[in-house]
Amino acid sequence: MMNTRKWIPVVGCVLLSRLWAAAAWAAPSLTAGTASGQPGTAVSLPIRFDPGAASVLSLQFSLTLPPSLSTGSIAPSSLLTAAGKGVSANRKGNTWTFIIFGLNQNVISAGPLLTAQMMIAPGASAGTLKVPVSSVVYADPKGVSIPPGAAKGGAVTVLAASPRASPPLPQASPTTKPS
């Protein structure tokens, strides 16, 4: 006769490890996109969301801005508007924190979440500025925290400033000789 006591812990561990692997695979993810512009201009950085297999009711995350970027306006996507969600943002130091919430039980679908407008400093050097995503927190309809999945930061490419165009030189009028 087989001893089932030895098999139960083994089978239980195998099932739990598969469940954890599936949960990690289906976890929500947040991705910041890319933008580019010249010094002294505004750029719009898109933020995308995928709830995976989770039902996400609200979320919070932060973007860390390099010194050459400053905060601008925020445009929630039609996806958030349709779900009846609002966006609140606050900047402290170089951290720009976003809270997405609503006084309803509507979950947030996959797709574009919002666009964060930033200003590139007038004296910024050409190159790529990384904008990391951090401090991601998700909540389900019961207010229970959902373990975050992947969070991918974005980048702003500062293009070389275009040379200032010189005004055209006045053209000399043709000289005519009296006849």
Image (cartoon, helix red, strand yellow):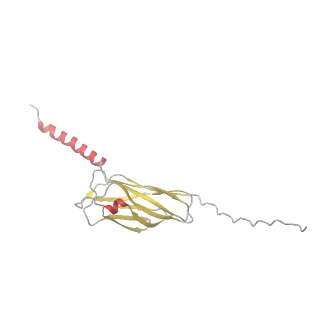
At 27% from the left and 45% from the top, the residue drawn is 22
From what the image shows, is residue 35 above or below residue 4?
A: below
Could you tell me how many numbered marks the image carries? Answer: 0
Q: Quadrant of the N terminus?
A: top left
Farthest right residue in view: 179
Any part of residue 171 in sight: yes
- Give me the residue at 29% from left, 54% from top: 147
What residue is rendered at 28% in x and 58% in y? 107
Q: Quadrant of residue 166?
A: bottom right
Q: Is 111 on the left-hand or right-hand side of 66?
A: left
Q: Is residue 59 visible?
A: no
Q: Which sits in the foreground, 68 or 111?
A: 111
User: Residue 52: percent from the left, percent from the top?
Assistant: 30, 51
Left or right: residue 63 versus residue 39 is: left
Out of 114 and 25, give the one closest to the viewer: 114
* Residue depicted at 27% across the width and 48% down the height: 23
Which residue occupies the extreme top position in the image? 1
- In the rendered view, tell whether residue 112 sits above or below residue 17: below
For this rendering, which residue is in front, 148 or 37? 37
Query: Looking at the picture, how far across and down is residue 175, in whole percent?
Result: 84, 66
- In the orientation shown, which residue stands out farthest toward the left? 1
The quarter of the rendered structure image containing the C terminus is bottom right
Compared to residue 129, the image places residue 25 above or below, namely: above
Q: Position of residue 37 (x, y in %)?
A: 53, 59
Q: Quadrant of residue 132?
A: bottom left
**Residue 59 % position (x, y):** 32, 61
Residue positioned most to the front: 179
